[in-house]
Image (cartoon, rainbow, N blue to C red):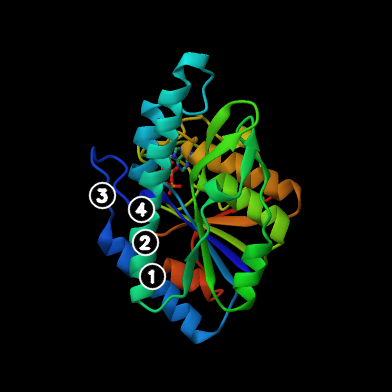
Amino acid sequence: MIILKIGGSILTNKDAPESEVDSKSLKRIASEIKRSLDNSSKELIIVHGAGSFGHPPAKKYKIGEAFDKDEYPQKRIGFCEIQNAVKKLNMLICEEFISQGLPVIAIPASSFMTASLKRITDGDLNIFKDYLSKGFVPVIYGDVVLDKELEFCVISGDQIIQYLSSNLNPEKVVLGTDVDGVYNKNPKTHDDAVFYEKFSSIEDLDALEGTTNVDVTGGMVGKIKELLYLADLGIESKIINAEIEDNIYKVLENEDVKGTVILRS
Ligand code: ADP
């Protein structure tokens, strides 16, 4: 089984004021995945980020922060707005995948997962196994879920990667984003950033500058924290650049791709 994350930074324009899909990237990535599945059948789960569809409303409604009782109706409608926005993105993604012949089936986190203090605590994954066994490609994405302590929270695609991987024990966990992997500091804002082929400690970062965009779930730092947690369980993962043509195809085909492997030393 392979668990593949496609970052919101690839599928949407996270800096745009309006929610926009990057159709060119979406088409290319769908075709890379299709080409690989046509070569040989494999069990694949796709996780995608919320990108520009989820983060702006999540920021606006401050979902995940404590609030007074009288704010409840406003928070609740915010929750609905976010759930609908990320569902829209997922629908556009699935539409493209299906049109290219990929048998994707959406399994939204908000419909079966719950959290406590922003961490997923419950979510029965048997349905993933059932769909996989019938040759489907389950798709799940960054979403809002009910939280036992905070009422509502946002869970990132990266946290979902961690939850799925620790419960399903995949052979391979890959995260495609818009940079080559992990650097000692943000490569988009520092020309002298140093690239890591292997990464095993958050202390190797010079600055905890999550991301350059509107991400509410921690950007690269959030991602690394989830993946280090997986590494603690003995599950290695790799961050690669999904903007580079054929990287997703190659990684699915076990070919060598530049990237950062997250592991415990
Ligand atoms: P995605 O939406 O693909 O999951 P994010 O936007 O959450 O990706 O995180 C990727 C971004 O993190 C990069 O575009 C980069 O600007 C930023 N970033 C911040 N610090 C680092 C770092 N140390 N190494 C690599 N990227 C970093």
> Extreme right residue here?
233
Label 1 sits on residue? 97
Query: Disc 4 and disc 3: Cα gap in Å?
Result: 9 Å
Which element type, helix, strand or loop, lies under badge 1? helix
Q: Is mark 2 in CB contact (under 8 Å) with mark 4?
A: yes
**For residue 246, which quarter of the picture?**
bottom left
The CA distance from mark 2 to mark 4 is: 6 Å
Q: Is residue 141 above or below residue 29?
A: above
Q: Residue at x 53, y 58 (%)?
A: 107
Expressed as whole percent of the image width and height from the top left, the position of residue 88 reads: 35, 52
Point out the frontmost of discs 4 and 3: 4
Tell me, yes or no, whether the two marked residues, 2 and 1, touch with CB atoms within 8 Å. Answer: yes
Q: Secondary structure at mark 4?
A: helix
Mark 4 highlights which residue? 89
The mark nearer the N terminus, 2 or 3, is: 3
How many angstroms separate mark 2 from mark 3 (CA)? 12 Å
Q: Is residue 34 above or below residue 187?
A: below
In this orientation, does residue 83 appear?
A: yes
Q: Which residue is mark 3?
A: 20
Residues under labels 2 and 1: Cα distance?
Answer: 6 Å
Callout 2: SS: helix
Q: Please name the residue shown 56% across and 74% down the image.
A: 254
Q: Nearer the viewer, residue 197 or 116?
A: 116
Q: Give the mark, 4 or 3, whose residue is nearer the N terminus.
A: 3
Could you tell which of marks 3 and 1 lies nearer the N-terminus? Answer: 3
Q: Which residue is mark 2?
A: 93
Disc 1 residue lies near ligand 1 with CB under 8 A: no
Q: Could you tell me the amino acid type at mark 4?
A: Leu
